[in-house]
Image: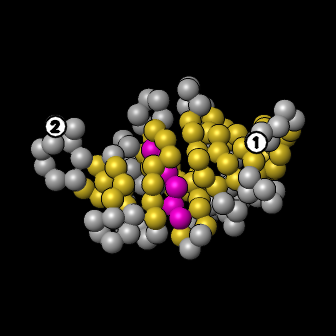
Amino acid sequence: MFSSNRLGGLDLFVARSDGSGSPEPVLPWEKGLVYVADWSADGRFLLYVIDRADNHDLWISPLDGDRTPYAFLSSPATETQGQFSPHGTWIAYTSDESGSPEVYVRRFPDTVPSGASRPTAARKVGGATTARSCSTSRSTAG
């Protein structure tokens, strides 16, 4: 998996590790800059960032079964630097939803219905203060 501008924008491509065949775009329909944030440890999910007109959102692309990508977090805030936890049950990411960049942690897969809010553990970047809960919501915008 790699990012390239060979189609005009920054897109994700997959290529065989032995060099055979041609690289294929992973999300050929996506408009905007697209780059990989992380892979799940079990290799089943790709976490990536889509930058559309200076709005960064985190998306998930299943790599087996139904490979339809979906927004993990799509909001007016900037969400970047997503990372799966070692066991794949949480995703940590940076968001400026509070007005300044902070790290948030959200369960994966998120079982909260679309548009619903729930408390989630979060830790501020660069500080020892830990917020025991913060409100996050899953958007269906896409």
User: Which residue is drawn at the image coordinates 56% and 36% (left, top)?
Assistant: 84
Mark 2, other Cα within 10 Å: few <14 / some 14–19 / many ≥20: few
Q: Is residue 130 above or below residue 141?
A: above
User: Which residue is drawn at the image coordinates 59% and 62% (left, top)?
Assistant: 56
Q: Which mark is residue 69?
A: none
Q: Amino acid at mark 1?
A: Val
Q: How far is mark 1 from mark 2, CA to CA?
A: 40 Å
User: Which residue is drawn at the image coordinates 33% and 72% (left, top)?
Assistant: 8
Q: Which residue is mark 2?
A: 18
* Secondary element at image label 1: loop
Q: Which residue is mark 1?
A: 125
* Secondary element at image label 2: loop
Can residue 107 be seen in this snapshot? yes
- Look at the magenta stretch and give its main secondary structure: strand
Residue 77: percent from the left, percent from the top? 70, 62
Residue 74: percent from the left, percent from the top? 63, 60
Q: Earlier in the sequence, mark 1 or mark 2?
A: 2
Q: Nearer the viewer, residue 100 or 20?
A: 100
Residue sticking out furthest to the top: 87
The quadrant of the picture occupied by the C terminus is: bottom right
Quadrant for residue 34, please give it. bottom left
Quadrant for residue 89, please give it. top right
Residue 109: percent from the left, percent from the top? 59, 40
- What is the magenta range? 46-51
Residue sticking out furthest to the front: 126
Residue 14: percent from the left, percent from the top? 29, 49
**36 displayed left or right of 108:** left
